[in-house]
Image: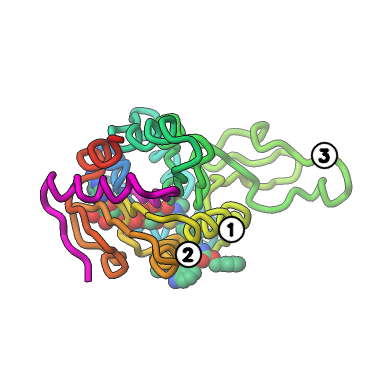
Amino acid sequence: MSATIPGLSELSEVRVRLQACRHIVALTGAGVSAESGVPTFRDAQTGLWSRFEPEELATEAAFRSDPARVWDWYAWRRTLLATVRPNAGHEALAQFARRHPGRLSVVTQNVDGLHQAAGSDDVLALHGTLAGDRWLDACPLVQSGVAGCDPQEATAGHPPRCTTCGNLVRPDVVWFGEPLPEGVLARAGAAARDCDAMLVVGTSGAVYPAAGLAEIADAAGALVVVVNPAASELDRVAGVRLRGTSAAILPPLLDF
Ligand code: BV8
């Protein structure tokens, strides 16, 4: 049974428990970037995108059926990301890791790169990052044993296209139905099994296998602390729920 911790005094109780932890994992979702001005993944899409669910756009099938529409959605998100900065929640995690080397693992579902921009090293980015591009299909040149074409040299367009082999450029993120980067997921699973506490920050807990990491930590006996202003699907594995926003809660929670 989890206790909703409403006040600062209870927050300091959790801080005392964290001070006894050898290894803490922060599993973050789109909510940790909300106070930077990045709409969360399942917030109502705005403007042109309001008639689509993200799950409808973030798939290979959607890209193959309408490459321009999906490319333009990512281009819109990239333009937005170019104007935002990490917030106090991202910075609290990065500063804690600098004060306590090797004691915090940051595992994120976010593709916005804001943990990295705040100075967090070795972020386990489960779903890739929006900053990168890759080819939609394997480059045929590589199969014939020569160096493949470079996505950076593709001809500009919606999406960019290779003038040599016609390949399309796609964002280097993990779409629904695609496997997560094997090494990243394995390291995240090991951290979830090893940690003494997991801070589950700003995620609805709707997406797997990422959300399953909280279940792994709970099963391994870790203290699971959910930081979210609203209820989430991971409240059921929370030992403690801190009702509030990440930029308000993380700085005092990690102030040791
Ligand atoms: C896969 C990149 C297998 C793209 C994203 C069980 C096991 C395994 C898979 C599945 C399973 N059940 C279902 C699946 C399939 C699927 C899935 O999970 N579907 C869901 C919808 C049911 N999973 C997959 O397809 C995964 N792949 O399993 O492959 C496989 C294996 C081998 C071979 C082939 C296949 C891939 C999933 C990755 C999808 N890509 N992102 C892009 O960004 O465009 S996921 C996407 O959702 C984002 O990364 C986002 O971060 C993530 C999760 O959402 P949240 O971060 O939680 O965001 P959300 O908006 O939902 O919630 C925000 C929260 O913040 C809210 O709770 C809110 O209250 C809170 N909040 C708001 N403000 C604040 C705040 N909190 C704190 N402070 C605030 N200020």
**Nearest to N terminus: mark 3 or mark 1:** 3
Is 245 magenta? The answer is no
- Please tell me whether mark 2 or mark 3 is closer to you in this view: 2
Secondary structure of residue under mark 2: loop
Res 136 seen here:
yes
Q: How is the image coloured?
A: rainbow
Helix, strand or loop at label 3? It is loop
What's drawn in magenta, residue-wise? Answer: 1-30
Instruction: Indicate the position of residue 124 as horizontal and vertical percent values.
Output: 51, 47
Query: What is the spatial separation of the Cα atoms under label 2 and label 1, in whole angstroms?
Result: 11 Å
Corner quadrant of residue 221: bottom left
Circle 2/circle 1 CB separation < 8 Å = no
Mark 2 and ligand 1: say if the CB distance to the nearest ligand atom is below 8 Å. yes
- Which of marks 3 and 2 precedes in the sequence? 3
Label 1, ligand 1: CB separation under 8 Å:
no
Residue corresponding to mark 1: 186
Which residue is rendered at x = 18% and y = 63% of the image? Answer: 3
